[in-house]
Amino acid sequence: MADTREGTTLFSPYQMGKFSLSHRVVLAPMTRCRALNGIPTAALTEYYTQRSTPGGFLITEGTMISPTSAGFPHVPGIYSEEQVEAWKKVVGAVHAKGSIIFCQLWHVGRASHGVYQPGGAAPISSTSKAISNRWRILMPDGTHATYPEPRPLKTSEIPEVVEHYRCAALNAIRAGFDGIEIHGAHGYLIDQFLKDGINDRTDEYGGSLENRCRFLLQIVQAVATSIGADRVAVRMSPAIDHLDATDSDPLNLGLAVIERLNKLQLNLGEKLTYLHVTQPRYTAYGQTESGRHGSEDEEAQLMRTLRRAYQGTFMCSGGYTRELGVQAVSDGDADLVSYGRLFISNPDLVLRLKLNAPLTRYNRRTFYTHDPVVGYTDYPFLSKPSGTKEQLSRL
Ligand SMILES: Cc1cc2nc3c(=O)[nH]c(=O)nc-3n(C[C@H](O)[C@H](O)[C@H](O)COP(=O)(O)O)c2cc1C
């Protein structure tokens, strides 16, 4: 719940449901393409433990719930025994450093390509509309291609996809994760159902807000009743149009999801762990969004309205600097702040933010490459800086 007590800062402890956090700086979920052929490797253990702090909270990169869910090379999965066993090592090492870790469950839907699909099939979605040529998919050989036409899921197929989320969540718990985050953001499968700029269905999963929210809510319900609502979180980005995920009324879409999550929590008699909302000022391409989003003030207002409506822990993300994070928490606009790009290049980000120390600049070119070290685990710690003065300049 809102914690607006005077003196609360980004570095104050926070009780996130049953998890006692020692600070509010969270590792945002980030695809890094280092899990060769879908299996977490020792490099992931190193990467996540580098970013662990006692009482800290980490969210993994988007993790495939099923063989049809990938749209990037070398992203990890959580649907096979081999993957579960491999994740155990990562989670065990993070726990040994005192951090709490959730696995982000991901299905990219139409943001995929035949090369990532079993038998080269068309990717699944809510629609048959392809992502426009404005966007390109990263191919396994490092080149970029246009997105193909997806295959709209038949109504009768949807329960099977919900079941994939449920099984993936159970697998995550077996792997030792403290909980899971359902990736309902950024234009991927769930967002392809939520947004009226994509969803053109005429069945009970399309049209009204009630119908567009149905897929997400069925997933949350299925997962929460299997592993406990207090281990389940949801991520959404109602105002972000990444991969053409536009909506005619982002605020009311966000409020519609929240209203239903609040109701579900009441019915279950238990709160979800948190709601994670990405703010539009973030874009993976380092530019502004397509121009549909509003001013900084309007965006902040949207986040505040969503924050006030949600009856539970609220995490914000998207372009947060130290100052903005400190302000969001002390103003009561968020309980937790997730940091993405700054955490890529600053494994000890929590310490650096606390000390207001200089930050290392991130190198965008190695975000999605596959080297187990370069651009992944070779960013310097404060105590042994190896960066140049320029790299270490204050961001
Ligand atoms: C390299 C990279 C990969 C990302 N992968 C994911 C992902 O797998 N799942 C997700 O929900 N968000 C993903 N994001 C978005 C981040 O979680 C975060 O919301 C975004 O980077 C904005 O935060 P920042 O401004 O602190 O970087 C990714 C961002 C980056 C830069």
Image (cartoon, rainbow, N blue to C red):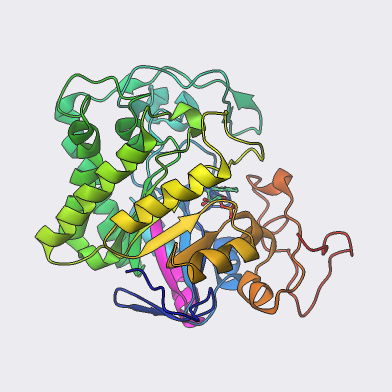
Q: Magenta segment: does it hold 99?
A: yes
Q: Nearer the viewer, residue 286 or 59?
A: 286
- In the displayed structure, 221 sits above or below 16; it is above
67 left or right of 242 in image: left
328 left or right of 172 in image: right
Who's the residue at 60% across and 65% down the image? 47
Q: Position of residue 265 (x, y in %)?
A: 18, 60
> In which quadrant of the rendered image does the C terminus lie?
bottom right
> In which quadrant of the rendered image does the N terminus lie?
bottom left
Q: Does the rendering let one see residue 68? A: no
Q: Residue furthest left?
A: 267
Can you tell which quarter of the image residue 225 is in?
bottom left
Who's the residue at 34% across and 65% down the image? 313
Q: Magenta segment: does it hold 351?
A: no
Who's the residue at 38% across and 36% down the image? 250
Q: Position of residue 207 (x, y in %)?
A: 22, 24
Can you tell which quarter of the image residue 103 is in?
bottom left
Q: Does the rendering let one see residue 335? A: yes
Q: Position of residue 156 (x, y in %)?
A: 14, 28
- In the displayed structure, 210 sits above or below 168; it is above
Who's the residue at 50% across and 54% down the image? 317
Q: Which residues are magenta?
A: 88-104
Q: Nearer the viewer, residue 208 or 58?
A: 208
